[in-house]
Every structure is written in structure tokens, then in C-alpha cells.
Image (cartoon, helix red, strand yellow):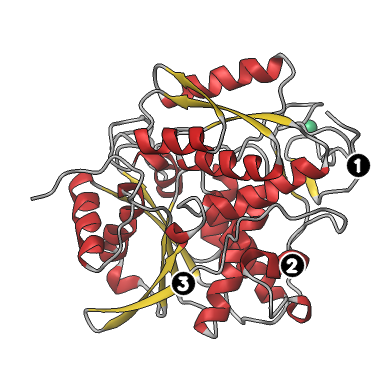
Amino acid sequence: MASLRKWQWPFRCSGCGSPFPGEGFPFRCPQCESIFEFSQDLIYDPRSVDKRGVGLSRFLTSIPFPSDAELITLGEGNTPLVETELMGRRIHFKCEHLNPTGSFKDRGTAILVSAMKHAGVTTAVEDSSGNAGASFAAYAAHAGIHARIFIPDSTSGPKRYQMEVYGAEVIPVPGPRYAATQAVLEAVDKGAIYASHAYLPHGIAGMATVAYEIVEQLGGRPGSVITPAGQGSLLLGLAQGFQALLNADEIHEKPRLIAVQSKACAPIWAEFKGVKSGLSSRSEGETIAEGIRILNPLRSEGVIASIRNSQGDVIAVAEDEILTGWKEMGRRGFYIEPTSAVVWPGMMNLWDHLQDPIVVILTATGLKSYNPRIA
Ligand SMILES: [Zn+2]
């Protein structure tokens, strides 16, 4: 690593309260190995939003970001909010699948990779089932950081190829998703810097800009926001963003946050509903929603607290419902990956309980996933 510059991120250890160190780039607390979390609310400053800028960069003063850092950007953010009518209601689709690498992850990666560059990191490792790895590979390439990415060997061909084209060193790991994490942790034990989108909180700040954009585009607050949830980083970012908008008097009530999981792997749903067993909630079952097949979300307590705090809900949906949702979205002109399609049955199941305006987040493109064949 080159020389390290000091800047205090507003993060603290969730275990012992230690601040995120001004030097180095640990993925968890060096003292007690707990994860870092935000130590304060984000501060949204409407006067400093850059009216003429593009995308996420417009909001740099309303998220934690070192004043002397360069934003590593590929033009993420500024995604369209597309309206459609459904059974007499207006539904607003937030098209996060149109970000530079094809997923919402780019907003978080822009902040994380900028932070690493600012800290003097020149090479880093990551593990991913696909979209996060592709995103990290792109931004690392743009920043001149060497990326080594451990992927489950079941990762879809196009996502793996995408990482390789960005110049990342891709290391396929046989076995389930957690085997890739084990492999990356072994590399970290040997001294590698871990650019973990799951452990590190930097990316959540980038996700908050989705909330900022939605309120701008709608001209007010949404009633309900529906999103897939695996680790729940997007949901946490939305919660942070809407809280900051509320604190700044830009909105007067927060929207209800609705998280959708696959029944094949629904730990957040099980915790939220108080389900002790059954419904494969505590297993890593087969699902076409592979991007949210996360058995042990690192921030599940925070995710559940954020949903409760918004008067929101969690719903788990079946495989046939996800497939139906994927087809329905396609028929409306949205080519998203099956993981992203969980929002459709989520919306249908809660239809009578949703507050308008309804915003549905489309998280990733269908152009690089293994997709079911339909007649
Ligand atoms: Zn600690």
C-alpha cells in the first residue's frame, strides 16, 4: 500500500464502539472482529445538491465522503423512475438495472472504491455471487486498483466474463456460496485488503442516494418502497436516505419499506415474523433468485429495525411466483434478472396494504444472468 491519508468516516464498531480507523482498511473491527456500522444519521443538505451534476456525484455532500477524495465514478445513479398503470394504480419502477455494470451495486461500489483509493489501497480481494463482483471489478479497473475476486463456480458465465473483461483476477471456488467467502477470508488472513460490499458500511451511504433521487423524481415522498433483500444493504441505504430527508424537512413522513425474499432462503422474513422453523427459512435452498440467497445476513438486526421503524413489512415468495413476476415484468418491457423479479409477487401479495405512491426497485439487468426459458 502507498502512504495512507487520514479521514474520519462516521462509522463505529457494532461490538465495542471503536471508530473506523483513520489508517488502514480493516473489513471488521481489529479489536473485537464485529462489523462497523454508522455512528450517526446521514445529513441531507438540499442547498448543496449539485443541480447541474450527473447521478450520484450530485449528492456527495449529503453522504459521508472525504472532502479531499476523488470520486471514482462511471456515471452511476440518475436512473429513470418509470411509471406504469396496474389495476387502476400508478406504479413507479426505479430502474437500478440501468446502472453502469447493470445493477444497483454500482452506487455502493463507487463510494467504497473511492474510499479505498483515498486510503492508498492498490490491490484488494472481494467475494461475490455475481453483481457485486462485476461492479467491484469495473470500479477497481477505473481506479487502477488490482482486483482479485473469489466467485462460486456456479456464477453465471456472462457475469464471470464481465469481471474478466474489466481485468479482474477471477478465482472460481467449488461448493456453496459461503465457500467463496471462506476462500477470501484465507486470503485476508495472509494480508490481503478485503473490499467487502457486505462487511464494510461505505456502500450503504451510496445506496442512500436512491432515496434522494426517488423523492426528487416523485416530487414528494413515496408511500411504499418495495425491494428485494439478501444482505439488505439497499434497504439500509434507503432507510438512511429517507431518514436524512425527514431530518432535513424534505419529507414529513417516511415511506413503508417492504423487503422481499425467496421462500427458499428467507432468514430476514423468519426473524421478522418470529418463525422458529419451517418454510426453509433457515436453509440455503435452490432458488432462481440466486442474488438474494444469503443465509446469514450480516446486518439483519439493523435491516429488521429499519423495516419496523418504517411500519414496513417482509414477505417471502415462492419460486412459481418469482417466475410469474419475471414474465410479467418482461411483458411490460423490463428485462431484469430473476432475483429482481421477487418484487412483483411481493407487491401482489401486499397489494391491499400498500400505500400510494408505490415505488418498486428493479435491482439488476437480465442481460447477464442465467434465465429460465419460457414458452
Ligand atoms: Zn470492536
Q: Secondary structure at mark 2?
A: helix
Give the image location of residue 259, x and y in percent.
Answer: 43, 55
Residue depicted at 53% across the width and 56% down the height? 235
Image quadrant where residue 299 sits = top right
Going by the image, does 113 lie left or right of 82?
Answer: right
Q: Mark 3 vs mark 2: which is more N-terminal?
A: 2
Disc 2 and disc 1: Cα gap in Å? 22 Å
Q: Quadrant of ligand 1?
A: top right
Disc 3 and disc 2: Cα gap in Å? 21 Å
Can residue 232 be seen by looking at this rendering? yes
Q: Mark 2 vs mark 1: which is more N-terminal?
A: 1
Residue depicted at 62% across the width and 62% down the height? 208
The residue beneath circle 3 is: 80
Can residue 304 be seen by looking at this rendering? no
Give the image location of residue 55, x and y in percent.
Answer: 61, 67
Give the residue type that dot 1 points to. Answer: Arg
Going by the image, does 370 lie left or right of 172?
Answer: left
Q: Secondary structure at mark 3?
A: loop
Q: Are marks 2 and 1 in contact (CB under 8 Å)?
A: no
Disc 3 and disc 1: Cα gap in Å? 36 Å
Give the residue type that dot 3 points to. Answer: Pro
- Sort mark 2 into few (<14), some (14-19) or many (20+) by Cα contacts within 10 Å: many
Which label was assigned to residue 5?
1
Give the image location of residue 9, x and y in percent.
Answer: 82, 49
Residue depicted at 69% across the width and 79% down the height? 52
**Ligand 1 within 8 Å, label 1 CB:** no
The residue beneath circle 2 is: 62
